[in-house]
Amino acid sequence: MEGTDLIQLTPRDFKSDQEVRWCPGCGNHAVMSAVQKALSELGIPREKFAFVSGIGCSSRFPYYMNTYGFHGIHGRAAAIATGVKIANPELSVWEITGDGDALAIGGNHFIHVIRRNVDINIILFNNEIYGLTKGQYSPTSGMGIVTKTSPFGTIEEPFSVGELVIGAKGKFFARTIDSNVALSTKIYQEAARHKGTAVIEVLQNCVIFNEGIHDTVGGKEVRDDRTIVLKHGEPMIFGRESDRGLILDGVKLRVVRLGDNGYTEKSLLVHDALESNPGIQYMLANMRHPEYPMALGIIRAVPGQTYEKALEEQIDGIRKISPVKCTDDLLNSGSVWKVE
C-alpha cells in the first residue's frame, strides 16, 4: 500500500466518537496520539486500517480509533490479527497488546506470529504490571518487585521483549517511550512500511499501579545520559553533551567517553538495522542501566518473505497443477459411487 498525495488526513480523522476511559496521566494517551499522527501521514485511507486487541487497559484502543477494529480475548490478538491479514492482505493490521496479554497467556501466539513473519504491526505496551486487574506482577516485572501477587518480592527473571522477538526470528524490533511522541511517530510509520511482523515495545507508564517505573531511564533529568536513540547508518553516540558512545570490545559492547584514550566519533560502532546477523542487535536490545544506556529507536529491520505472500504463492502453484478446480471436481474425485 503506497502513499498517495490524493489522500489528505489529519490525526483528528482517526479519533472515534467514544469517550477515552484511560486514567488521566496514563501513558496510553500519548501512544494513541502518536499512532493517530503517524497514520494520518501515511497516505492510506482509514478503511484500509484494522486494529485488533486482546484484554488489558491498552486493549481498549480499537474503540478510540476511527478505523476497523476488533476487541478480542485475552492473549489471542495475534491469532485474530493473523486471520484478518490473511483474509484481506490489503489491510494495514495493527495489534494492540500489553506485557501481560502478549507475554503471559498470549506468549505462544506472540512468538509464532513473529516466526511466521505475518505482515502486521504489534504495539506492545510495557508498564511491567497488570494494570486492568489492579496491580499483579507481569512477565516483564523486575526481579524483587513488590506487588499484590508478590508481597515479598518477585523471584522470577523477567522477559526481555527484544530478546524474545529476535529469538523468535523477528525481522523488525523497535523500542520507544510513551512520552517521546516524535520518536514514536517515526517508528510507527517505519513499522507500517515494513513488510512482515513489526514489533514496537513502548515503555509505558501506569500512573496508578506502577507509577514512574521507567523514570530511571526515561525521566526528564536522566534520559539523555541513560538512553541512546539508534539511527541506521549513524554512530552510536549519546549523552547530554553527546560525549559518550558504544564500541565493540571483543564480543561485548562497551561504553566509552569521547576524548578519553583517543576515542573519537570515528571509533564508535555505526548502527546497522539491516544486518541479517542479529548478534549486535541482540546485545543492543538487551542493554540496561546502569552498565549501558537503554536502546530506543529501530534496532532491527531486515527484509524477509511474509507468511501471507508465501501462502498465496503456494496456493497459486497448487492450483496450476491440481486437477481439482472447483468444489464439483473435489466431490467427484477419488472413489465415488451413485446411489439409486
Image: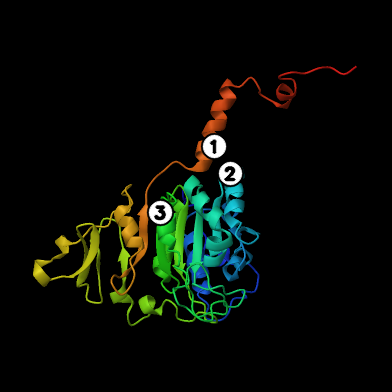
- Residue 10 drawn above or below residue 146: above
Residue 337: quadrant of the picture: top right
| Badge 3: residue crowd in 10 Å (few <14, some 14–19, many ≥20) | many
Mark 2 belongs to which amino acid? Ile
Q: Secondary structure at mark 3?
A: helix
Give me the C-alpha separation between circle 1 and circle 3. 23 Å
Q: Please give left or right for residue 93 compared with residue 185 in the image.
A: right
Q: Residue 117: in sight, yes or no?
A: no
Q: Which residue is mark 2?
A: 86
Q: Which residue is mark 1?
A: 311
Q: Which residue is label 3 attached to?
A: 166
- Nearest to N terminus: mark 1 or mark 3: 3
**Who's the residue at 62% across and 65% down the image?**
55
Question: In the rendered view, would you say 65 is above or below 310?
Answer: below
* Residue drawn at x 41%, y 50% as measured from the top left: 171
Question: What's the CA distance linking mark 1 and mark 2?
Answer: 9 Å
Q: Secondary structure at mark 1?
A: helix
Q: Nearer the viewer, mark 1 or mark 3?
A: 3
Quarter of the figure with the C terminus? top right
The amino acid type found where label 3 is placed reads: Ile
| Residue 268 visible in the snapshot | yes
- Between the residue at mark 3 and the residue at mark 2, the CA separation in whole angstroms equals 23 Å
User: In the visual, does 144 lie left or right of 312?
Assistant: left
Q: Image check: 300 left or right of 149?
A: left
Which of 159/58 is in front?
159
Between disc 3 and disc 2, whose residue precedes? 2
Where is residue 45? Give x, y as percent: 55, 54
Query: For numbered disc 2, what is the local secondary structure?
Result: helix
Callout 1 amino acid: Leu
Do residues under tags 1 and 2 come within 8 Å of each other at their CB atoms? yes
